[in-house]
Image (tube, helix red, strand yellow):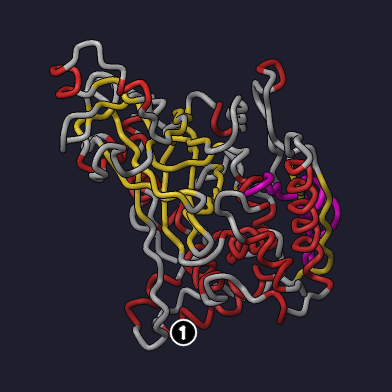
Amino acid sequence: MLTIEQNDRITRVGPSTPMGELMRRYWHPIAAVSQMNDKATKKIRLLGEDLILYKDRSGAFGLIEPHCAHRRMNMIYGIPEESGLRCPYHGWLYDATGQCIEQPYEETEDPDARFKDKIQMKAYPVEEQAGLLMAYLGPQPAPLKPAWDLFQMGDVVRDIGYAQVDCNYLQVMENSLDPIHVEWLHNYWANYVMEQLGRDDLVGDRARHEKIHFERTNHGIVKRRVVVGGSEADDDWKVGHPIVFPNMLRQGTFSSRAGGGFQIRVPLDDYTTGHWWFRCYQMVEGDQPQASEHIPFYQVPVPQLDAEDRAEWEKLDNNSGQDLVAWVTQGGIADREKENLGRSDRGVILYRQMLEENMQIVADGGDPLNTFRDPATNEFHELPTESDARFTKMGPARQRGGAATKYSPIMIEREGVVKY
């Protein structure tokens, strides 16, 4: 259990909070490039701040506070210029740094006016990475965007999924440090879901865990498991499953039909998480290299919490839907003062320890884990992941997939709507 104060410390992400300061040391996805193909502005919420993402006429992206510094009109209606975003109310123009660079009437009345030089709106850097738009809200100089393996790979096709989840990021991340839930939530309860839907495509028997283990790595935590019928010779134990600090799960192997991917859990505020599914697939005949603006984006439906509505149960026939209701039903922020952790929760405890350690590093003026500043050490970070051989031991439950298989445009195109 945690005290109320301890729980607040690792869940509150606004400006000047310990966790907010830690999370501001990282680049976070805020949109897919393809989401901006037909629009110039988009509302963004990140780490408790409301912002406006925009694309100017040169194709460059910016991220700025939402209200013009003049008369406070919202910049969601801003006019993209060749460089920067112009307020439609009186024409003040801001560049990517938030600096006001034009004030039409002021300059008409006094061509030498320097008033604009005094006007600075809050703005943050935005950079593209593998079809995602990444934002950095921390102090300068900004670190490099980490060169995680799936972001760097060529000769692949990708798609990007997203859901806004009404709970704190920590509930989502702690799920990734909890192997035991697979045999219950994604197997035993999944069979009950199929029963409620009147379907006969059951998951089958549970693959019981005999042993679990967690250890630190250079990039976070690796979780290992042995299930009934398996051994420590299996990849589930030898290679394991990586959690990338502070907020990312590496899933799947690149050779599998569903590809390899990341689940990225972005704290939008204390009570809301932006959940991203980023997936890479091997190219097949007919595939063409993707420009960032052509990487498909899809929305993942979030089950509404109404057990009497059978239409909502249709969203629960896959791992992602099952996870979503497990996270959200804990409440906006889980009450960890009332929890009772057991032996299966060692990974959760280790992750909380790492959060505390890295919050302290930031408080002491240092760079937390996975902060990269030297390009020579940030060329390609490989994240070994257990192979598909695990399916033979874990059974059908491990093949049920989730958003990345049920809703992925690429998977649907290749295999049709996946039946679970």
Is label 1 in a helix, a strand or a loop? helix
In the rendered view, tell whether residue 46 sits above or below residue 399: above
Residue 390 lies, in percent from the top left, at 69, 54
Q: Residue at x 38, y 55 (%)?
A: 407
- 207 left or right of 191? right
Instruction: Locate residue 67: give its quadrant.
Output: top left
In the rendered view, tell whether residue 376 sits above or below residue 120: above
Residue 87 lies, in percent from the top left, at 21, 34
Residue 234 lies, in percent from the top left, at 79, 52
Characterize the local packing of mark 1: few (<14), some (14-19) or many (20 or more) Cα atoms within 10 angstroms.
few
Residue 339 lies, in percent from the top left, at 72, 79
Q: Residue at x 61, y 65 (%)?
A: 171
Q: Residue at x 23, y 44 (%)?
A: 73
User: Magenta segment: does it hold 21?
Assistant: no
- 246 left or right of 400? right
**Quadrant showing the C terminus:** bottom left
Q: Residue at x 57, y 59 (%)?
A: 169
- 260 left or right of 413? right
Please provide the residue range marked out in magenta. Answer: 223-248
In the rendered view, tell whether residue 199 sits above or below residue 37: below
Q: Which residue is mark 1?
A: 195
Is residue 290 shown to the viewer in this render? no
In the rendered view, tell whether residue 84 sits above or below residue 247: above
**Quadrant showing the N terminus:** bottom right
